[in-house]
Image (spheres, rainbow, N blue to C red):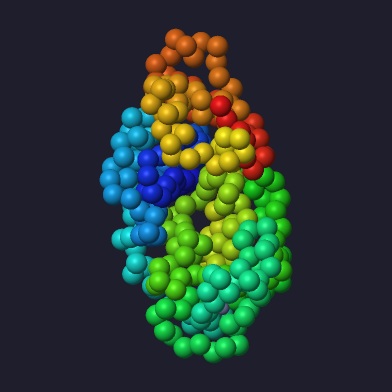
């Protein structure tokens, strides 16, 4: 059984880039006769904005993107995160880190995905104080996976990333860690998301292997940009209000390079979506990491 999901962060209204991810993950699940879940990534309290969840749910419903079951919230899963965090801690491959951002930017090399952590605190033997981050030790065995859109990717965690944070110094679990537990709890089989997360996938595979979780299939779709920059909330606001729901769907289908029937102008929203599911072809999506729109 295919189980996919859309996992927005409630840091504002959905923008064109997030709608692309929502619609791509929805179509891939529906084409496979699968389930499509909605998970609200609200663990990072600094990024959560008031009323944003309501606005996200409303936007999805207005686009006829109806999720299966009740939506889940990362903020309701702290006990489960703690349970698996303890499991990782018992493996003796974690340690505390007190490096500041400033220290790292002055002393660590920048890699493809942020700085490469060279293990400054590995042998410091820092004790369990609340204001220290917890890092996961990695190794040099390459992590290889086949992305359905981006193709084969191989990453050597110790060379390209370094020991990475699973719990931050403010006590919050990191994205890399929480998302693995979410996939386990939700029995996710397929992940369709933006290519900005491509280089973090090997860290998630590493944790999933350690915890003996099943590894989902990954598909990383290009990020929507304007003048090569990620779309900002204000740009999107204009884009969304001047379009009706069907136009948004067609804009997204165009972005995803999907076949669109010449008779689409005579279709209503439901028929357009039916057509999109029937003709969904992930292999037509460009393997670029970003594409300029508008
Ligand atoms: Zn450190």
The image shows residue 36, relative to residue 203, as above or below, that is: above
| Label tally | 0
Residue 211 point in image, percent of width and height: 52, 70
Residue drawn at x 63%, y 55% as measured from the top left? 199
Instruction: Please state if 145 lies on the left or on the right of 90 as rendered.
Output: right
| 133 displayed left or right of 11 | right
Q: x%, y% of residue 161?
A: 65, 66
**Residue 232 visible somewhere in the drawing:** yes
Query: Which residue corresponds to the image point at 38% horizontal and 29% vertical from the top-left?
Result: 63
Vertical order, 181 against 137 (above or below): above
Give the position of the C terminus as an image quadrant: top right
Q: In percent of the image, x 52 and y 74: which residue is there?
A: 100
Which of 106/110 is in front?
Answer: 106
Looking at the picture, how far across and down is residue 280, in whole percent? 55, 29
Res 209 quadrant in image: bottom right
Q: In terms of depth relative to the viewer, which is nearer, 219 or 292?
A: 292
Residue 77 drawn above or below residue 4: below
* Residue 29 makes an appearance in the image: no
For ligand 1, the image quadrant comes to: bottom right
Of residue 38 and residue 184, the one placed in the foreground of this image is 38
Q: State the residue in front, 37 or 50.
A: 50
Q: Dividing the picture into quarters, in which one does residue 118 lie?
A: bottom right
Residue 196, how many percent across, how many down?
58, 49
Up/down of 17 relative to 258, above or below: below
Residue drawn at x 71%, y 58% is 154
């Amino acid at each position: 059984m295919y189980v996919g999901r859309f996992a927005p962060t409630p840091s504002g209204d959905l923008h064109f880039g997030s709608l692309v991810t929502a619609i791509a993950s929805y179509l891939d699940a529906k084409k496979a006769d699968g389930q499509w879940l909605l998970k609200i990534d609200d663990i990072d309290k600094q990024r959560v904005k008031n009323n944003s969840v309501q606005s996200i749910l409303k936007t999805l419903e207005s686009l006829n993107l109806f999720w299966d079951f009740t939506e889940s919230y990362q903020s309701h899963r702290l006990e489960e995160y703690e349970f698996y965090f303890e499991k990782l801690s018992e493996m003796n491959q974690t340690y505390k880190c007190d490096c500041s951002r400033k220290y790292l930017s002055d002393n660590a090399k920048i890699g493809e995905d942020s700085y490469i952590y060279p293990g400054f605190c590995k042998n410091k033997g820092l004790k369990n104080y609340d204001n220290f981050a917890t890092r996961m030790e990695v190794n040099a065995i390459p992590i290889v996976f086949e992305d359905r859109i981006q193709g084969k990717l191989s990453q050597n965690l110790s060379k390209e990333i370094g020991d990475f944070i699973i719990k931050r110094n403010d006590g919050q679990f990191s994205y890399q860690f929480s998302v693995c537990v979410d996939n386990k709890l939700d029995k996710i089989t397929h992940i369709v998301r933006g290519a900005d997360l491509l280089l973090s996938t090997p860290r998630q595979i590493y944790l999933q292997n350690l915890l003996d979780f099943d590894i989902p299939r990954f598909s990383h779709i290009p990020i929507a940009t304007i003048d090569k920059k990620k779309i900002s909330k204000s740009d999107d606001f204009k884009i969304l209000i001047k379009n009706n729901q069907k136009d948004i769907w067609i804009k997204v289908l165009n972005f995803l390079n999907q076949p669109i029937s010449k008779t689409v102008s005579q279709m209503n929203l439901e028929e357009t979506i039916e057509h999109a599911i029937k003709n969904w072809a992930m292999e037509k999506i460009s393997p670029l990491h970003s594409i300029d729109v508008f």
